[in-house]
Amino acid sequence: MIQTIRNRFVPIFRSDRHSAVLLLGAAALGLALANSPFRDVGLGLKTAHFGLPAVGLDLSASHWIADGLLVVFFFVVAAELKNELTNGQLNSVRKALVPTIAAVCGVAGPALVYLLIAGEEAARGWPVPTATDIAFALGVLAIFGHGLPSRLRIFLLALAVLDDLIGIILIAVLFSSDLNVPALAGAAVAIGCFGLLSRTLHGHLLPVGLLMAVVAVCAWFLVVQSGIHPTLTGVGLGLVMRGSYGRRLAHHLVPWSNGVILPLFAFTAALVPLPQAQSLGPVFIGLAVALPVGKAVGITLGGMIGARVARRQGAPSIPVWDLFALAVTGGLGFTVALLMNQLAFAESPELMDQGALGVLAGSGLSLVAGAALIGWRSRVHTRLAAQASAAGHTESADLVPNAT
């Protein structure tokens, strides 16, 4: 029975398209509950504390999800990043050139747009719109981009992975406070031990695996005590684990991340009562504009700049209109943007609520516009492929931006 359920549902949760739909549904459910007659129940559960006083842990339900369960998501991201850097589309300067420049500009663009709108009072929210949600963006591509060449998914994946790497660095640098050096040193030792143990797994899977699980929990606890955001534990564990085992573990964790953890986080992060329209300030407006507009402009310009350099080195790139469609889809900040919002406005609940609504609004605009553009480009590529097939030609592998 359990095997039947697993065989039926695991492929669903592993799918980009189903993951995107589930994320959107969870966020919509959270927003609906927070603005229904039962909102006190939902908000009460979100803020209810469950702790282990003996070891100094006293977190609310939303913090257990954001600081605990999201570690699994960041582990999967780190394992994907490591694989791309060693064996994938980022394993050489030539391959990584265009997505790297596009990702950097895709971070700078929305940050500048946000600062121009929000002003100095809410300036600390500038990192929020810099993130792109890998699962959501790839889900939109899977749903609406049936006719697109596979190279576009590779580019979007590379772009989103690099974007998340920048986001991880921002979290580590901007949202660490009251640094506890001994705890941080202990966490580093534990993460190092985790990496060493992963190299002894062969032939001792069960005992070593259990020991690694204990070491991972100890590392998370020490990171919590260190003052660095706990999700960085997942990044560290994913980067130090032996590549082959890291990819295998990430593969098994993806259904749990997509099917349980990310929807839970989306639900709790979107559990925000809607304020009166006149009370929506510059934080909401800044994020609602920065995600769809800043990302679209930044990624497109970055991709075009990268393409100029890429042509000299023979590096692949993509057509301009395809690049723009992917750039608009990059405005789907969602998971990481909601996490950044919680960190940036941790001391201002009102601004945090505005920020969550701004992220949802901006991601919603990016979803609609990105889906329309990707659908259009899909039809164009389907028509071109049919014409090429009729003429007896094969698809060109050239990815350098052009006017197509």
Image (tube, helix red, strand yellow):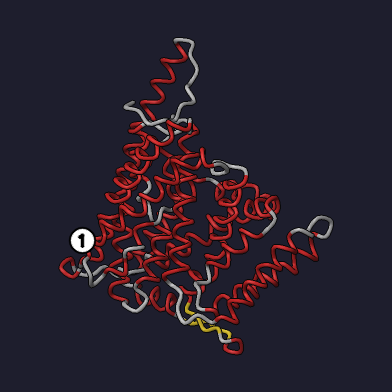
Q: Pick whichever, 78 or 309, lies toward us.
A: 309
Q: Label 1 crowding class (10 Å Cα cut-off): few <14, some 14-19, many 20+?
A: some
Residue 230 appears left or right of 202: left
Quadrant placement of the C terminus: top left
Q: Quadrant of residue 190?
A: bottom right
At horizontal 54% and vertical 41% (from top left) the residue drawn is 89
Q: Can the viewer see residue 367 in this picture?
A: yes
Q: Quadrant of residue 188?
A: bottom right
User: Which residue was labeled with disc 1?
Assistant: 117
Place of residue 63 in the rendered image (x, y in percent of width and height, measured from the top left):
47, 74
90 and 137: which is toward the camera: 90
x%, y% of residue 350?
Answer: 28, 75
Which residue extends farthest front?
Answer: 312
Q: Please name the residue shown 35% across and 62% down the image.
A: 128
Q: Is residue 369 left or right of residue 173?
A: left
Q: Is residue 368 left or right of residue 268?
A: left
- Amino acid bearing label 1: Ile
- Tell me if 287 is positioned left or right of 153 in this view: left
Q: Residue at x 44, y 76 (%)?
A: 45
- Taking 266 as reference, is 64 above or below it? below
Depth check: give the residue in front, 173 or 8. Answer: 173
Residue found farthest to the top: 391
- Residue 206 position, x and y percent, is 79, 62
